[in-house]
Amino acid sequence: MAGNSELPRQIVVTPTKSVGISIILTVLFGPLGMFYSTIWGAIIMLIISGIVGLVTFGYGLVITHPICVIWGALAAHSYNKKLLEGFKLIVRN
């Protein structure tokens, strides 16, 4: 061990995010469910949904709620894609 000048390899384990769970959470909880997949997206949609909900007496949430579901699913998919691309770069080196 004293003659070995190489540093030990460090492995960071990061779990992927489930697109299905993201969809279920956003369907059930709207923008609050987006916190699973995207924090900034959730904050943005909470503000937008609040404003739209107040201005349209709640009827506009019919439009913002599906947007939250789609955004949450795409954010989880994008997170997984970036994570796996980084993993491929590490494995190749």
Image (cartoon, rainbow, N blue to C red):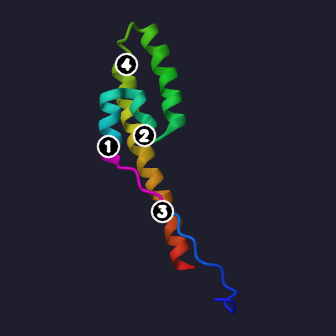
* Dot 2 amino acid type: Tyr
- Where is mark 3, residue-wise? 13
Q: Residue 4 placed where, x, y %?
A: 66, 89
For discs 4 and 2, the disc positioned in front in the rendered view: 2
Amino acid on which the number 1 mark rests in the picture: Ile
For marks 3 and 1, give the CA distance.
Answer: 20 Å
| Distance from Cα at disc 4 to Cα at disc 3 | 38 Å
Distance from the alpha carbon under mark 4 to that under mark 1: 21 Å
* Labels 4, 3: front one: 3
Residues under labels 1 and 2: Cα distance?
8 Å
Q: Find disc 1 in the rendering and name its residue.
A: 21
Taking depth in this image into account, of 12 and 4 the one nearest to the observer is 4
At mark 1, the secondary structure is helix
Q: Is residue 90 above or below residue 63?
A: below
Please report whichever mark, 4 or 2, sits nearer to the chain's N-terminal start: 2
The image shows residue 77 at horizontal and vertical percentages of 41, 51
First in sequence, mark 3 or 2: give its number.
Answer: 3
Number of other residues with Cα within 10 Å of mark 2, as a class: few under 14, some 14 to 19, many 20 or more = many
Q: Indicate which label's residue lies in the foreground, 3 or 2.
A: 3
User: Which secondary structure type mostly characterizes the magenta part of the structure?
Assistant: loop
Residue at numbered disc 2: 36
Return the disc, 1 or 2, that comes first in the chain's sequence: 1
Residue position marked by numbered label 4 in the rendering: 61
Mark 3 falls on what kind of element?
loop
Residue numbers of the magenta segment: 13-21
**Mark 3 or mark 1: which comes first in sequence?**
3
| Residue at the far bottom in the pictured view | 3
Calculate the distance from the C-alpha at mark 3 to the C-alpha at mark 2.
Answer: 18 Å
- Is 49 rendered above or below residue 87? above
Pointer 3 and pointer 2: residues touching (CB < 8 Å)? no
